[in-house]
Image (cartoon, helix red, strand yellow):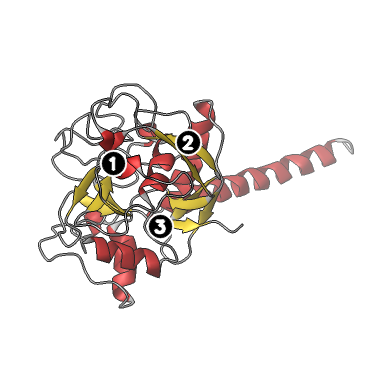
Amino acid sequence: MKTDIPNRSRRRHTLFVVPGLLVILMALYFFVSADSFRPIRTALITELRLVYRGETPVRMKFSRRDGMVQVYIPAGEFMMGSWQEKNSGRQKAHPVYLKAYWIDQVEVTNAMYALCVAEGQCEPPARVNPYFGKAAYADHPVVYVTWEKAQAYCHWAGGRLPTEAEWEKAARGTDGRRYPWGSTPPDDFLLNFNGVHGEPRSAYDYLAGASPYGLLNMAGNVREWVADWFDPDYYAISPYENPQGPLAGETKSLRGGAYWDDAKQVQTFYRLSHDPTSPGQNRGFRCAEDAAE
């Protein structure tokens, strides 16, 4: 009888511990499942996917200002452009060396942009925007913003728009990928393109199409403003280290293609341009930030 008392005590202890663990696990589940923690949840899932694909996990940091997860892109060389575009100097392959930098994992969302507007540091998107300010589209990329509005937001968030070179390296890595995920032809599982949905989708969708650094929607969804002025002949004179684009121009560069663009236009090296004062439903952005030396 005496030896049975400790056993009963252990059983009672277990009965109390198991419900306690269940409560903790349930609390953790609801904590992580909440919309406000979607950036962190997406970052964790992305890391697991990178490991599953045989790629190296990446460094990430969380921005308290807008809730964005940023990804670290290490210093080094990559091949910008494409050898396959033989008849066009516009996308001519050439080596580029970039210093280390951080870049947003996803396109800036309506919810993030609204924080800047609320602080009086950003102007609202164009009035024709059918998504901004509506809860159902909080996680969708903000659109109908001019180049200057995008740059103003990035400055408020503590960064800047990425250069064309920074954007392309983040999209394709150092192994010359045609698409962020590799060479597999694009389909609706990997990205939002070719008019399948007819409008932008959540900035957190299409995890299977992540770039080698874990960035989402680097192909399709919305075209993204970058810092550079556009010049179709710039690659012929582009410096090897940290190219910043032409000193002046009439249009600004856009990258990544949009929801109505085809398989050619969503390639990692494909270059687009537009009037920087013109907002539109297919134009959004993400930000970059210099890394501390």
In-front residue for pair 110/264: 264
Q: Position of residue 249 (x, y in %)?
A: 23, 57
User: Of helix, strand and loop, which one carries label 3?
Assistant: helix
Where disc 1 sits, the SS reads: loop
> Where does label 1 land, which residue?
256
Task: Judge whether 166 appears above or below 109 on screen.
Answer: above
Which of labels 3 and 2 is toward the front?
2
Depth check: 286 or 227 in front?
Answer: 227
Gap in Å between the C-alphas at discs 2 and 1? 18 Å
Residue 255 image position (x, y, % from top left): 28, 44
Residue ID for mark 3? 36
Determine whether the residue tagged by mark 2 lies in a helix, strand or loop: strand
Q: CA distance from mark 3 to mark 2?
A: 35 Å
Q: Amino acid at mark 2?
A: Phe
Q: Quadrant of residue 187?
A: top left
72 is higher (above) or lower (below) than 50: below
